[in-house]
Amino acid sequence: MKNITVIGSGTMGNGIAHVFAMTGHQVSLVDISQPALDKAMATITKNLDRMVAKESITEAVKNSTLANIKTYTSIKEGAANAELVVEAATENIDLKLKIFKDIDEAAPATAIMASNTSSISITKIASVTKRPDKVIGMHFMNPVPVMKLVEIINGYCTSKEVTTAINNKSKELGKIPVIVNDYPGFVANRILMPMINEAIITLFEGVAGVEEIDTVMKLGMAHPMGPLQLADFIGLDVCLSILNVLYDGLGNTKYAPCPLLVNMVTAGKLGAKSGEGFYVHTPGSKDLVVSSSFK
């Protein structure tokens, strides 16, 4: 599999395109708007420049990586020659089902179709295609060029051959794959999201403040960042969406989203992407400033 199509050019999509292109794959990056694609290519270029500055890659590797990526605003064109399609669109089930129907029509019959979903059922996604045996989850972690894990999710109908192929492909990218089964939240988010939600409940109930909660988890549990900072980084809307998938799919109140999280998302306080969540995020600044809402 050398011809790769990535659907979605946001944070995850451009990161996935980056790692495939840097390992010699021909990448077709697809999004609905050219400005979004231009922004993605600028981000990839910036990240490659940073790697050159750190001497982790050469200028030649940067140039060849960029040359390996072509952009398209149509799935029909972008997936026409794909051997593997990786969907990295917004974590919305209706959108993903529509995209997979379109991929199924556009991509060659032999192509494998993977979703970067962090919680939505692979079996459900596969059910709208004519090739459910060729549908699999390929959950990269953010930031994709840095993080080693790829959570590989088998749908109910995913073939062993497809699982083996994606497992091997992940290793080829320099990643460490872990194969799991298709249950709400898989492994990563089934464990991570309840922790983040509990941190938000702890804040909501007035047990401690934002910095205090994050400091306890960083210094006491050796986490690289606290759960509230991590929630901001992931996106509070994404956290809420995943918790709803867990709550609906597993039917246990321990997965019920904290009312504070619901209210913040409703108010548009989504974390780093909106400029404010539990912290205020100023472009170009590494300083963490707690939102005035929690002071």
Image (spheres, rainbow, N blue to C red):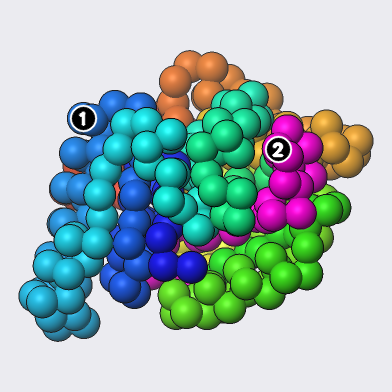
Q: Which residue is mark 2?
A: 129
Instruction: State the SS at label 1.
Output: helix
Q: Which residue is mark 1?
A: 35
Residue 10 visible to the viewer: no
Residue 74 percent location from the top left of the image = 37, 31
Residue 270 visible to the viewer: yes
Badge 2 crowding class, 10 Å Cα cut-off, few under 14, some 14 to 19, many 20 or more, is some
Three-letter code, disc 2: Thr
How many marks the image carries: the answer is 2
Residue 127 percent location from the top left of the image = 78, 37
Instruction: State the SS at label 2.
Output: loop
Q: Is residue 94 above or below residue 27?
A: above
Residue 60 percent location from the top left of the image = 10, 77
In front: label 1 or label 2: 2
- In the image, which residues are magenta? 121-148
**The C terminus sits in image quarter:** top left
Q: CA distance from mark 1 to mark 2?
A: 30 Å
Q: Quadrant of residue 120?
A: top right
The answer to which of 245 and 170 lies nearer the viewer is: 170
Q: Which mark is residue 50?
A: none
Q: Quadrant of residue 246?
A: top right
Residue 51 percent location from the top left of the image = 19, 72
| Residue drawn at x 85%, y 37% as measured from the top left | 249
Three-letter code, disc 1: Pro
The answer to which of 83 and 91 lies nearer the viewer is: 83
| Residue drawn at x 31%, y 73% as measured from the top left | 24
| Residue drawn at x 43%, y 44% as measured from the top left | 80
